[in-house]
Image: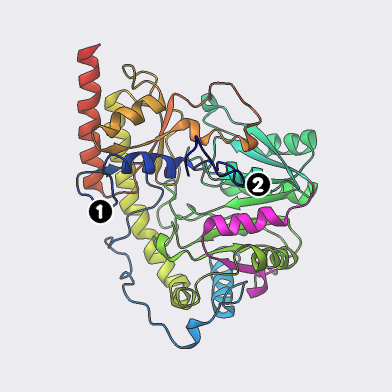
Amino acid sequence: MSEEHPITAFRIVPKTGVIYVTSEATRLGFSPSHPDWCNLGQGQPETGELPGAPPRVHDVAISVDDQEYAPVAGLPELREAIAALYNDLYRKGHKSQYSAENVCVSGGGRASLTRAAASLGSINLGHFLPDYTAYEELLDIFKAFTAIPILLDGDRGYAFSHEDLRREINGRGFSAILLSNPCNPTGKLVEGEELSKWVGVARDLDCTLMFDEFYSHYIYRSRPGVLPVESAARYVTDVDRDPVLIFDGFTKNWRYPGWRVTWTVGPKKVIEALTSAGSFLDGGGSKPLQRAAVPLVSTDHVVKETLAIQAAFRDKRDRMLSRLERLGVRFDRIPDGTFYVWGNVANLPAPLSDGMGLFRAALDKKVIVVPGEFFDVNPGKRRPGRVSRFKDHVRFSFGPSMAVIDKAADRLEQLVAEHMRAG
């Protein structure tokens, strides 16, 4: 559809940051399989074998029954297996345990989030800046609730305490807050005692915390011998009364993004509402892939996969930080989690000194990055006509292989050197 001559019945729908940069690169010849391109903009991890990880699934058997629709809430056996995983990882010793009724399976992370957004009432919903780009349209399309931003400060490493949380809920009248933890793009993680206090504040003030935990197995601050995972599920007192909703799935933490198998964990009554929303929004996910997913959510599989992820991606994180720092990129914080580095490029030579300028110039070197302004979540463009606070920032993904990261860093070094000579 041409932006100059849209069909009258339809509005122009904005692209998320990753889709925008990929579309622009595609115009110049990019494809995911093209060996000359380095995609540091990708929102998915490398999906091949990793040392120490369980064997990858390459074939999925499809029975006659699997040709039918899956239940909107997901296959019962998968829901039960997910509940068991959360109980085993996070709720040993707790009287209150998750069951299949606390789990709703969806066909992708955005489908999970959309079901939740469609189920919200006429409330004030808080969201942080910066955060995941796809939240922007999600928070605008449903008009029942009002999305209100909470600004985080890079000079403080994007810190936000439970006292800050209490003050914001009381001051702005929030009934719910949506956030990614660890945060996409900054890598900031709320964990341990502080996360427990966040859940306590939510319980005290009846404010639902909606945790996007899709990167919760990519954590680089773990102690030796401790599985590097974190979830708000660990700190819930009553699974059916505490206002905590958790989103996760195969796309990141299992490294199967193409399966589009994700889930929401929360109180039974909320899960019932999300299932009802799914019945008219998306109708449910893939039945054969849900069935194939059941053995992959066993604790043994998750432990092996997570330890392999942590080892491989910590090395890639450290390599990327080192290479970018040599270029003159600086960091508001070293990422605690995710597979992204949130870099400030203001010290690079113009026009590389802002996110969009670096993005455009890097395309000439067949390197893709995501400008920081896409993470300045602005539902409905209610803050028009201003320069983004994150115009000097770029999100660099270390989701690709180490070889791609090194190739991209070499090309960015060449790019910076060329502009320094020209300057």
Cα distance in 3D space between marks 1 and 2: 34 Å
Q: Which mark is residue 33?
A: 1
Position of residue 354 measured from the top left corner of the image (x, y, whole percent): 40, 23
x and y percent of residue 15 in the render? 49, 42
Q: Amino acid at mark 1?
A: Ser
**Kind of residue sitting beneath label 2:** Ile
Residue 406: image quadrant is: top left
Q: Is residue 185 magenta?
A: no
Region rendered in magenta: 93-122
Residue 78: x, y in percent?
54, 75
Q: Is residue 331 above or below residue 88?
A: above
Does residue 46 lie above or below 30 as drawn? below
Side of 358 relative to 262 (left or right)? left
Numbered badge on residue 141: 2
Q: Give whichever of 316, 34 is nearer the camera.
A: 34
Q: Nearer the viewer, residue 358 or 165?
A: 358
Q: Which of the colour schemes (rainbow, by chain, secondary structure, one colour) is used?
A: rainbow
- In the drawing, what numbered circle is on residue 116? none
